Amino acid sequence: MAEVAKDLTAGTIGGAAQLIVGHPFDTIKVKLQSQPAPLPGQLPKYSGAMDAVKQTIASEGPMGLYKGMGAPLATVAAFNAVLFTVRGQMEALLRSEPGAPLTVNQQVVCGAGAGVAVSFLACPTELIKCRLQAQSALAESAASSGAVKYRGPMDVAKHVLKSEGGLRGLYKGLIPTLAREVPGNAAMFGVYEALKQYFAGGKDTSGLGRGPLIVAGGLAGASFWLSVYPTDVVKSVIQVDDYKNPKFSGSIDAFRKISASEGIKGLYRGFGPAMARSVPANAACFLAYEVTRSSLG
């Protein structure tokens, strides 16, 4: 139980650091992912990441970049606590003896297992976050369709529970969330361990300083998005899709329609902000986790 408590505490602090550093990038990513496809002859609402930043600040102020942070902030403790605790427990199961270092392949397995667990927390949180982040991008097309304007995270949750099928509505997009979190976390924790062992010159990574941990954490975060980004686009469009007049019947349908109308490029909308976010945000997360974990003994 002492080890679980350490992972819970360190995971929570790591998650808070990740959220504070990365949320503005995530807001721009979701806006680019979820903006409606322009009609023939028309320009998209946002021409790119910087244009989305400028328009967001102009219309909503700097705090517009932090829109939707309430939902993940409220659950960041639970999310990262589960992620790092499940990973820690799987590490304990796979060790040949207490304290023995794990191989990279074993860390991949631990990451995949942790990804399954966190998906059930991530799905409703992401749905609320994406609805709040995307509503300004969807506003023009929504004006004629009577789409809801949300006042905050609790307002989204209440609306979904009341009008979109109850608890099932909050888990809209669970399949693509699983398809993102399982391989994404497998890649991230595998790359993180591989880089730590590379920098340490062997399996014992306990003596690594903060510099190598920052580099390993940043590149590990980048590997997450490199491995699963199109799945994240599908997840986002499914979760912000109109409940009464859906554009997509499911994940496969969303993948096909985006590919058909926009090509492969459509599956990488917002990729720049996602990658720009992943390196500093995950560097902050892993460093905060490692420092907190070591300080707890």
Image (spheres, rainbow, N blue to C red):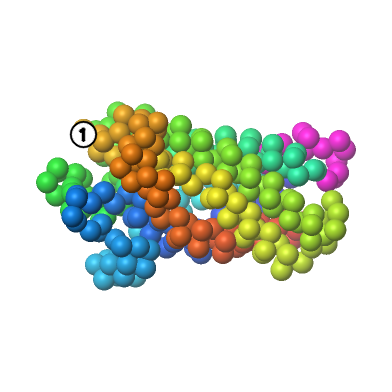
Q: Amino acid at mark 1?
A: Asn
Q: Quadrant of residue 87?
A: top right
> Magenta segment, which residues?
86-101
Mark 1 neighbour class, 10 Å CA radius: few under 14, some 14 to 19, many 20 or more: few
Quarter of the rendering occupied by the N terminus: top right
Helix, strand or loop at label 1? It is: loop
User: Residue drawn at (60%, 62%), measured in percent from left and top?
Assistant: 284
- Counting every numbered tag in the picture gives 1
In the image, residue 44 sits, relative to residue 240, either above or below, namely below
User: Residue drawn at (14%, 42%), measured in percent from left and top?
Assistant: 145
Q: Which residue is mark 1?
A: 245
In the image, residue 138 sits, relative to residue 23, either above or below, namely above
Q: Quadrant of residue 202?
A: bottom right
Where residue 295 sits: x, y (%)? 74, 61
Where residue 58 sits: x, y (%)? 26, 71
User: Residue drawn at (80%, 54%), measured in percent from left and top?
Assistant: 197
Q: Is residue 296 left or right of residue 175?
A: right
Where residue 50 sits: x, y (%)? 37, 68
Q: Nearer the viewer, residue 176 or 101?
A: 176
Observer able to see residue 219: yes
Observer able to see residue 23: no
Residue 250 counted in the magenta span: no
Residue 97 counted in the magenta span: yes
Quarter of the rendering occupied by the C terminus: bottom right
